[in-house]
Amino acid sequence: MSRLRRRKNDSSRPAGSGGSSIAFKKQKTIDFADDHIDSDQEEDPFHEDHDLVDSDDEEIEEEETLDAKKIRLAREYLRKLEAGGDGDDASGRSSTSEENDSSSEDEDETEHDRIGIKLQRERLKREGTLERAVAEKVKASIHHSRQSLQSVSKDAAETSTTATIQAKEWINAGHVRLLRGHDLTPTCVALQSNGERAISGSKDHSVIIWDVEDQRRSFTMCLPWKKESAEEKEATSRTMGQVLSVACSDDGRYAAVGRRDSSVCIYDIRVNNLKKPSSSGTLVKTFTGHKGPVTSLSFRTQSLQLFSGSDDRCIRHYNLNEMMYLETLYGHQFGVTGVDCHKKERPISVGRDRTARAWKIAEDTHLIFRGGAKVASADSVRVMKDDWFLTGHEDGHLGLWMTEKKRAVCSIDQAHGCVGNVGRSICALGSLRGSDLAISGSYDGFLRLWKVSMGQTLDMRGMEPLEEIPLTGYVNGIAVGPKARFCVVAVGQEHRLGRWNRIAGAKNRFGIVQLRSSEDIQGDDDQIEQEEVVESPDNVNESSSSSEE
């Protein structure tokens, strides 16, 4: 049967099939006898090769444009740095170089040195190891402001009457500006990294955004408490909505608000969301994990990691990139009163158990620091730079700590005076990160400035008082602006956590205190070379030890 089928297939094929048919098909496809091709339509035999070469040239041009773009951006960045300094014209420099080659070379060297110093400053600032000596400059500026007042009695007794008179003189002279906005005592304050806007919270449930440059209230993010009916009053207590702590991220995007009802609310405060008048802000997330009042909040520098401390003896860790809760840090035996964090993922906390703790998040351990049996519990903490922090205690004790030492490096008893034999409690601490300036606040009628020395040897470590600025009332919050130009404070009649003491002559205000004049700040840009821009050996050792860990 298979043979018959093969014979049928062979008989069905036309004559000349097989190899001749294949040749016929090839001739049919290549036959150009009847076609007439003009000279314009003739195909170049190297046309395909030229196309390949052109495509390769285009790829090379694309690569060159990317490199040129990088070079252009780098040159624009260097021009901005040059514009921030001398601002010399490039054409003028070229003409002078043609006249005098030696002088132009010297100018180029000095210019490159200046640009290199600026780049080094920015690198150290990103790493958090830049040390800025601004304490003496602030002292000189405040001393000049003090001399400009009509009558100042610095050697007079620090009575309440004298402090009130001096505070009015500073307000009338314009060195201190108190803005009205909160009905009850302001409890906390936070400042954006660029210093343009500030956030303050109060016991009247309100949270206000302030425009620091224009010295006015921008808008109210959380409305104040209003009198409720009898049924609503039984359901919710008035004190549960008190704002005890606020914090702002470095990018100016989020603001965290901690209340007495154990909630942590995250708001979006970008400018795009504030176009509507009397806007109440955009509530993004509410965390309800704490079981007690949220007494402190702190963002990690240049990140969206948030730490919250509460009276429930716990510290909770959040990641606002994902808007999620990460972990809880246990260790304190009593309520947490303060939390602060800088560049390292190592927050510092203080509590009513009279201890300060440095939490190593990556290693899941923490260090414990004790001030001794005679030192009361701390109300506030402030990280000066990585591995260095300040603590302010209820008995007026001010301590400087280093994470490598179990005991305080330096301590000052009754830093804000005393009432009888008991020192006034330090309610708030503030500082400029990476500098030697620190500010403490209490209810003695003065805002006190300190110079903090954090050297490598024992002789180069310590604290000394700089100046004092009169300010009546409880100073419940302090935040220092960029370059120490100013500081914002929350001043009220009562302590932020209770009502056991009340100052009748004080007012519930948001304050802006000028620390340096505009002439002094402009002089800093011309004297960049004189500032310390090289990493100290202490910082080098700290960075190497952290890398080894």
Image (cartoon, grey):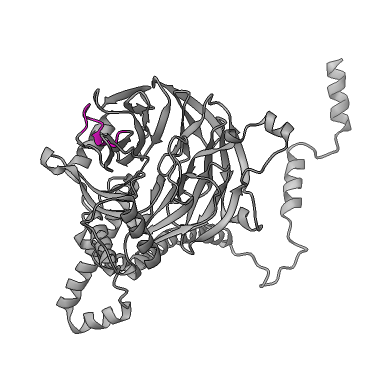
Tell me the quarter of the image containing the C terminus: top left
Where's residue 96, x and y in %?
Answer: 23, 82
Please state the extent of the stretch shown in magenta in the rendering: 395-408
Where's residue 352, x and y in %?
Answer: 37, 26
Is 259 part of what is drawn in magenta? no
Q: Nearer the viewer, residue 309 or 157?
A: 157
What number of labels is visible? Answer: 0
Where's residue 2, x and y in %?
Answer: 84, 17
Characterize the magenta stretch by its predominant secondary structure: loop
Horizontal side, residue 546 vs residue 280: left or right: left
Q: Quadrant of residue 128?
A: top left
Residue located at (58% from left, 42% from top): 205
Is 406 part of what is drawn in magenta? yes
Q: Is residue 118 visible?
A: yes
Where's residue 200, x and y in %?
Answer: 50, 48
Q: Is residue 174 above or below residue 513?
A: below
Q: Which residue reaches farthest top?
A: 1
Q: Is residue 398 above or below residue 173?
A: above
Tell me the quarter of the image containing the N terminus: top right
Residue located at (24% from left, 60% from top): 153
Q: Is residue 531 above or below residue 24?
A: below
Q: Quadrant of residue 47?
A: bottom right
Residue located at (56% from left, 58% from top): 218
Q: Which residue reaches farthest left?
A: 459
Q: Quadrant of residue 443?
A: top left
Q: Is residue 92 above or below residue 505?
A: below
Q: Is residue 387 visible?
A: no
